[in-house]
Amino acid sequence: MEIYRAKPATRKEMTQFHTDEYVDFLNRISPDNMDSYAKEQAKFNVGDDCPVFDGLFEYCSISAGGSMEGAARLSRNKTDIAINWAGGLHHAKKAEASGFCYINDIVLGILELLRYHDRVLYIDIDIHHGDGVEEAFYTTDRVMTVSFHKFGEYFPGTGDLKDIGLGKGRKYSLNVPLRDGITDSNYQSIFEPVIEHVMSWYKPSAVVLQSGSDSLSGDKLGCFNLSMRGHANCVSFVKKFNLPLLLLGGGGYTIRNVSRAWAYETGIAVGQELSPHLPITEYHDYFAPSHTLDVPASNMEDLNTKQYLFNLKAAIFENLRDIDFTPSVQLQPVPRMLHDDDDDHVLEDRDDPNSRRPQRLWDRNVQRDDEFSDSDGEGEGENASGIRGVRAKLNGDSNARRNEQSYASTQPVI
């Protein structure tokens, strides 16, 4: 596993999806001046479940930049799985914040993938419907969205089985509305056949999986009954298709369980079975009383009957059966590849001469508290845990994800 510090998304990158006015508003507003933007807050739905806080725009930039950089590395064959647990903010709209989400990093990441990939499959296992992503690609066949979520009188109130897309995107939005208390076995019984059917029919060349942890048992805002391993089974199943995979975070409001789930799923992504025994750290007490890497299911009632799930699968398969071919994509020029991230000499001339050790070299060192080092150069390979050091992105121009000519000439056709 390699850990990278992605460049925060720029205003220009954010406006590939979001409006200029909305992005500029997020950049300007702060707790100190928010009273002067009362009208704009109402217009952009900022203030209630999307509060203003110090560092809001920086937070949005970091989240979006991580997903975009992960997508870029997948497209350049630098990795087969990219993870951004700070991403997965699936409710944000083109010009509106929603459900704790301000900038839709998922849409921006998918747009990055579409520069190189013909078809992208988006899978959402957050308990809430992935409405922002579905809305963004509702009229295109280049992105298929599949959302497994709680439906009914529950935020955001969208994601009906009948919502299947419009125009060219008709049949390319797939919603799996579920009821309270779904268990591991019932979730698996619908997740695996649906995804397998979609994979064989749609034939995506890249996959984005939003792994929201609010579908875990015991979540403060959730009402499903998935264990940590039941939730992680979705990651394991999608990984088996051996497609470029962008793995993202999302919701999750019982924090100790979120950290458990995403740590365990990181292990699955890199092919490592993690020990159930948590190491002793300063955060050990947060995981009381069990102090183990586990989120067990509870004894809550599962309202998803076998008949309901059978009928649901039948309706979904019927929708897919109406279209019996893989959508084609118009040929277009392949964009220039970015500079190789491993070419250190590219950035040597750009290093600050007044800095004793530039940030890109500090990023290469990840040292455990219980280890000693005799040299500043140690840690540039693998550390004692087999994890490569955090590395800054080295794309020739350290302030650009791609050169301007390539950026302008490769806008995805959706």
Image (cartoon, grey):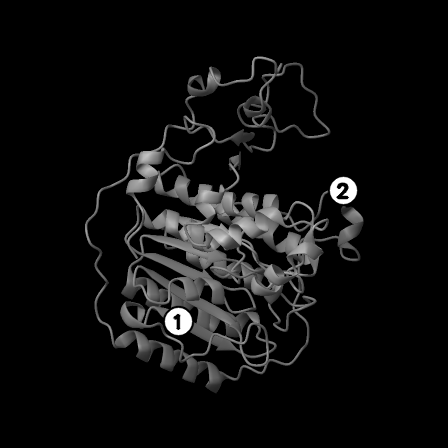
Residue tagged by mark 2? 280
Quarter holding residue 341 = top left
Q: Nearer the viewer, residue 274 or 110?
A: 110
x, y percent for residue 102: 56, 56
Q: Is residue 8 visible?
A: yes
Residue plotted at (65% across, 28% down): 367
Residue plotted at (53% across, 49% down): 24
Instruction: Name the kind of residue labelled 1 in the image.
Output: Leu
x, y percent for residue 355: 61, 16
x, y percent for residue 393: 48, 31
x, y percent for residue 402: 38, 35
Residue tagged by mark 1? 174
Residue plotted at (59% across, 60% down): 40
- Specify the quadrant that holds the C terminus: bottom left
Alpha carbons under labels 2 and 1: distance apart: 43 Å
Residue 81 vs 17, above or below: the answer is: above
Question: What is the crowding at mark 1: few (fewer than 14 residues within 10 Å), some, or many (at least 20)?
Answer: many
Task: Label 2: state its secondary structure.
Answer: loop
Residue 175 vs 404, above or below: the answer is: below
Identify the mark nearer the N-term, 2 or 1.
1
* 122 sits left or right of 351 in the view: left
Instruction: Name the kind of residue labelled 2 in the image.
Output: Ile
Task: Label 1: state its secondary structure.
Answer: strand
Residue plotted at (46% across, 68% down): 147
